[in-house]
Image: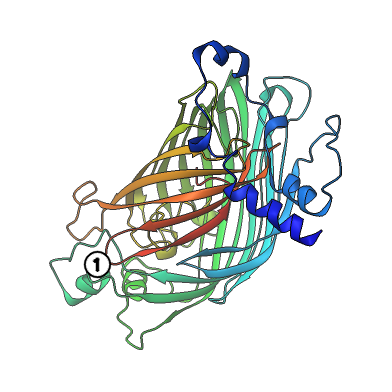
Amino acid sequence: MLKRRLILLLCLFTGTEYLYGQVQPITDSLKTAVVKKDTVDNQYDVGDLFVSIFHPKKKADVTRKKSAVTIIPNVAYNPSIGAQIGIKAVAGKVLGKDTKTLMSIAATSASITTKGIIYFYLNHNVYTPGNKWNLQGSLVAAKTVVPDFGLGIGNPAQGSEEDLILSNPDRKSYVLRAEYYNFREKVYKQIQPNLFLGAGVSFEIRKKIEVRGSENALTPYNIYSDRYGFERDHYQSNGMLFNVQYTTRDNQNRAYKGIYVDAGIRMNQSWMGSTRNAVQITTDFRKYWSLSDRNPEHVIAFWNWGSYLVSGALPYLELPGTGRDTYFRSGRGYTVTYFKGPQYFYSELEYRFPIMRNKFISGVTFFNIQTANDEMGTRLFEQWQPAGGAGLRVLFNKATRTNLCLDYAIGRYGSKGLFLGLTEAF
């Protein structure tokens, strides 16, 4: 019996009946009969795999609703954190009976990594019935280990010794350790179909900050902190958030079509406990094109994320940069904050495609590019840094379109790595 189950598992990954490339051609006269709208029922996810292996004689109950909650070991890997183990839960549900209501999603995780990172978070993106309100928020408590490669986009600064160390053109690696606490909540009100106005607050606190990997006090972090009036061992970045959002995405986890736009202003205020005042503009634009009515998983996806300091100063570890988007998924090919600056601009293009007929395995290819300034002579859009790669997707929960994502990406300066996570990058 065990042998049969193992053979079944192997067939799921290699069986020719599942692979698009091995399916016999369909004549024009038969196309109408076999082409039908894609549904959840004819898809296959990890839950179905477990049933096939451990309960092979169990008949599928088509009347039973698929659970909207996925609970799995939180196994991940990327060059920034090393190998990670923990527990993670992701949930998705449409609230109410209005068919136009967008899916609400929530996630929580507790994990530890081989680089000494301990991380707990709870986040949510909730749409009330009819999309009248949208609540977005997160709570984080962590012991962080952040790689640091200096300020800017890799251009050597023309100036003092401190400027050269700060720009770090050789991309020498430093390590910053700290305790990190964050609370963020935004409330959006729908004022027109798909259009929301929102406001909220964000509190970011870092304590016990220390630089590892260098005995020299002249490190990028120390130079920047001294130059812009921040204590080296702690700071707070607390402010008010004002946003406008427009969305027509058909799914928040993995969209086949639609658009998502969010533009906001963040105002860090000393009266809220922030170490320095600052005004910052952020933009997030995502567009999805499904290329096939028969197989809507064939998708071209585009993402642009930007952050621009208008006035004041931001703490070094809160500067926008690689992987500093809301869900830390940008810049595959580089570690988090590999490039960063007061002004930052990022774009990515991804092609998503099914591999198995039952949608259990799919794939992606992607290319991204980023630019930043450094306030030492290099301006935004003056130099660009590219990266790209490809990956596989395993359908974890077909009810919420949740995928396990395994990507390999390559950037410049010898930067490359394996990126493993749950849900799409964008």
Picture coordinates of residue 405, whole percent (x, y): 55, 51
Q: Nearer the viewer, residue 152 or 10?
A: 10
Q: Quadrant of the N terminus?
A: bottom right
Residue at far bottom of view:
215
Q: Is residue 212 above or below residue 378?
A: below
Asked where in the image residue 215 lies, by quadrant, the reply is: bottom left
Task: Please state the total of marks drawn on the protein image.
Answer: 1
Would residue 331 be visible to someone looking at this image? yes
The kind of residue on which mark 1 rests is Ser
The answer to whether one can see residue 345 in this image is no
Q: Dot 1, how many residues are within 10 Å of its Cα: few (below 14), some (14-19), or many (20+)?
A: many
Lateral position of residue 54 relative to residue 257, left or right: right
Percent x, y of residue 249: 55, 28
The relative height of residue 406 versus residue 294 in the rendered view (above or below) is: below
Q: Secondary structure at mark 1?
A: helix
Residue 102 placement: quadrant: top right
Locate residue 395: give its quadrant: top right
Relative image position of residue 334 (x, y in whole percent): 38, 60
Q: What coloring was used for the rendering?
A: rainbow
Nearer to the camera, 116 or 412: 412
Q: For the point 41% across and 40% down, which residue is it?
A: 350
The residue drawn where x is 86% and y is 34% is: 61
Relative to 177, does residue 279 appear above or below in the rendering?
Answer: above
Residue linked to disc 1: 167
Kindly give the residue lying farthest to the left in the view shown.
Answer: 158
Give coordinates of residue 192: x percent, y percent: 57, 17
